[in-house]
Amino acid sequence: MIKFGTGGWRAIIGEEFTKENIQKLALALCMKMKTEGAAAQGIVVGYDRRFLSKEAVVWACEMFTKEGIRVQFVNRSSPTPLIMYYVMKYQLPYGIMVTASHNPAIYNGIKVFTAGGRDADEQQTADLEQWLIRAEETYVCDDTEKGKMPTSFYQKSVEDGMVEEIHPLNDYLDNIIQVIDMDAIRKRDLRVALDPMYGVSLTALNTLLSMARCTVETIHAQHDTLFGGKMPAPAEHTLRNLQNFVLDRFCDIGIATDGDADRIGVIDDKGRFLHPNEILVMLYYYLMEYKGWRGPAVRNISTTHLLDRVAESFGETCYEVPVGFKYISAKMQETGAIIGGESSGGLTVKGHIHGKDGIYAAMLLVEMIAVSGKKLSEITEDIRRRYGVTHMEERAYRFDPERKEGIRRLLMEGKHLPELPFAVDHVSWLDGCKVYLQNGGWVSARFSGTEPLLRIFCEMGKKEDAVRCCEIFEKFLGIP
């Protein structure tokens, strides 16, 4: 059974990510669209560089057109934010992107977007899962002997106009150019190192940076479905080559994006990896201090509380939501927040799309360097002096299904907690378990919505305290 997590449906290729399951999901969406009266508006689909991504879109297109739903197909590997933008701009009811984002190369998956270009929320995905039950009963595979879809069905759909192959990248880039101060960037003659991590951001970022007269040097740009043997996630341990490259080439900034370009990783001018928490805090500060914006911020439960300090210093509020960008975008719309983000590297800004966008975030960071007239490392120090320093400890643990159930019963259901060496202020069960401490620190434990992992996060004023809290939780949960 196909199940949606915080970032869509993801599965191991050949086990659950199969032609049959992809077409069942497409059929379920067709049924949902017809019931809602949205079928006549059609759907837009796209894919990234993962193994079987393009083939998966073709299989989905066959099902959509068989059910009489017209498809606009972005027929080249594209960033996820491009598909979200297209759904928003052309007021489509749905869009899908074939990607497993930052997951290991053995995974692929599908993200579903709804009206406004938003990630499908829990109600939408639960509804779609119900339609999948119906799709299971009525689905038929590609079998011409039984009068089903012939193998040439896709090409015939193109010829009949049921599938329109489109290339809307310029539309998306123009939208970013309109809100970024390209003139300020042109005056700085910046040198940028770019690491697409073998993913789909190269064309978009290279075009934007070149238009801004930046000198751009790129690594890991070729198409590699194994992502160089690493996860296509812009984390400190995956960006060692980019760190060295920035130092060797005297770059002002190093920018990396994950496999589908909705998350970002950054190396500063001194070769230091900037945690996504730092990036989010930095951009929120920049929007208010330099651009004069005002408004709240939104973060998930696993993201730094430094964002709250920045908000408070400008008389604003920072709102906390569960993990999953759909919660961030919904809260931004509700509160009029000017920025929303998460500690895994995804963020968006008011006036752009309603989902995370690594390409837009990258250009905003470059603009920040240009407008402030400061090096990235100098801006980081400014923020540290003004708001202090915290230390985030992040740990992830794999487990078998039996162990997961035991942890769930103990922690999430029984609500039992370990004895911590710091006074507890209160506990939240909004998403997993989060313990707020009276010293301003916190520790959380929750199951990942995209991988079979238990994640423990702790933010404290001192690194040793954060490590200690994580170890206490490990021992309490019996994690080796």
Image: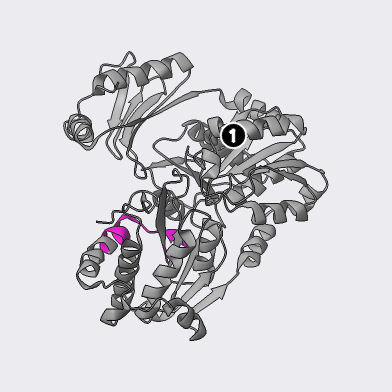
Using a 10 Å C-alpha cutoff, classify the residue at mark 1 as few (fewer than 14 neighbours), some (14 to 19) or many (20 or more).
many
Q: Is residue 183 above or below residue 429?
A: below
Q: Secondary structure at mark 1?
A: loop
In this rendering, position of residue 86 left or right of residue 330: right
Most extreme residue toward the front is 145
Indicate the quadrant where residue 258 lies: top right
The residue located at (64%, 33%) in the rendering is 241
**Nearer-the-camera pick, 371 or 315:** 371
Residue 164: percent from left, percent from top: 52, 78
The magenta region covers 113-127
Q: Residue at x 17, y 33 (%)?
A: 409
Percent coordinates x, y for residue 240 in the rendering:
61, 30
Foreground pick, 35 / 52: 52
Looking at this view, name the residue that lies furthest to the bottom: 160
| Residue 74, percent from left and from top | 54, 68
The N terminus lies in which quarter of the figure? bottom left
Judge whether residue 125 is colored magenta.
yes
Tell me where residue 280 sits by quadrant. top right
Task: Tell me if I can see residue 355 in this picture.
Answer: yes
Total numbered circles: 1
Q: Residue at x 68, y 60 (%)?
A: 178
Amino acid carrying mark 1 in the image: Leu
Front residue of 75 and 432? 75
Disc 1 designates what residue? 239
Image quadrant for the C terminus?
Answer: top left
Residue 162 percent location from the top left of the image: 46, 82
